[in-house]
Image (cartoon, rainbow, N blue to C red):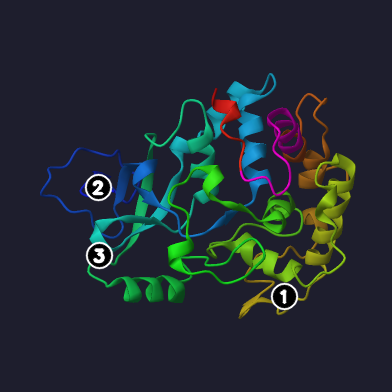
Amino acid sequence: MRNPLPVRRGSARGGRAREQSDAARPRVGDVVVAPLSDLHPTQSTLGFDEICSKLGRYTLGKNAPEAKGRSDPRTRTKTAVIGPGSQLYLTDGHHTFTTLAEMADGGPDARVKLRLVADLSDATPDVFWATMRRHGWTHLKDAEGRTIAPADLPASLALADFGDDELRSLLYFARGIGYRSTDVPFQEFHWAEWLRTETDIDLRIRHEHDAYLDLVERVTRAQASLRPDARISGDLTAADLGALPRWNDGAAKGEGAFGRLSAPYESPRPGRLAYALEFRQLHGIHPAHRGPEHAHRS
């Protein structure tokens, strides 16, 4: 892979990216623009249902253009570290950028914005990965929660290069119902570690809307019932990981985030779960399947 830096650079305060000379070197805090093909993943799995939900929302139904316009992945600024050889390593945004990589008007040449959180370009590979682990900037686990080596990470952001963490998929739908987003890196993966202790979770129902929705409700009610100081993953507590003190943030079952999630595909505004299942069915993506073979990009 070519050296991706120097690249287009912008103000860390959100100013417009501007062309820099080849002599300019991005600094920590800068916002840079780079193609997806230059970005190194730092996790080996994704929640495939999150990708399918976003792709469904952007490509299916009468609200697709509006949905894409509101949340086009190109407009999101994610974070990265400059690693050995001045390569860019993602610390956030794998789901967003893989969605873009799989879109018909995206692909590996699509350019995205990244805020640089560290410059480890002078580190040896061993020191680099030790630093990434220490700061929580990498998630070196497979879809079953087993530890992997950095060499086992995907080569690109293509969906087919990742494993499908089914619990991570489930937790995408739990957002805003059992927990809120925080700044903790790989937040949903930490919740997934907690769920691995729940032996009665049956993920074979992921193709059934109502059964999947019932599972989301059960998991999110369990999250909302946790004590704030309950240990969830390592030293991280329920409070650290954004557990909500009241289920559905206090809204009635048919309202709030759970009400929106519950909307079937036939409704005027389908829920995220409905979009995921519709897109999976349309493109033949089943649980444990390793990608849609770009059916939606044909």
Residue type highlighted by circle 1: Pro
Q: Position of residue 292 (x, y in %)?
A: 62, 36
Q: Position of residue 129 (x, y in %)?
A: 39, 71
Query: Residue 120 is drawn in which quadrant?
Result: bottom left
Q: Magenta segment range? A: 276-290
For residue 228, which numbered disc appears in the image?
Answer: 1
Q: Is residue 66 left or right of residue 284?
A: left
> Who comes first in sequence, dot 3 or dot 1?
3
Q: Nearer the viewer, residue 114 or 43?
A: 43
Q: Is residue 14 left or right of residue 236?
A: left
> Who comes first in sequence, dot 3 or dot 2?
2
Disc nearest the viewer among 2 and 1: 2
Residue type highlighted by circle 3: Ser
- Answer yes or no: do the residues labelled 3 and 1 have beta carbons within 8 Å? no
Q: Which residue is mark 3?
A: 121
Q: Secondary structure at mark 1?
A: loop
Whether residue 286 is situated above or below residue 234 in the rendered picture: above
Alpha-carbon neighbours of circle 1 within 10 Å: few (<14), some, or many (≥20)? Answer: some
Q: Nearer the viewer, residue 255 or 31?
A: 31
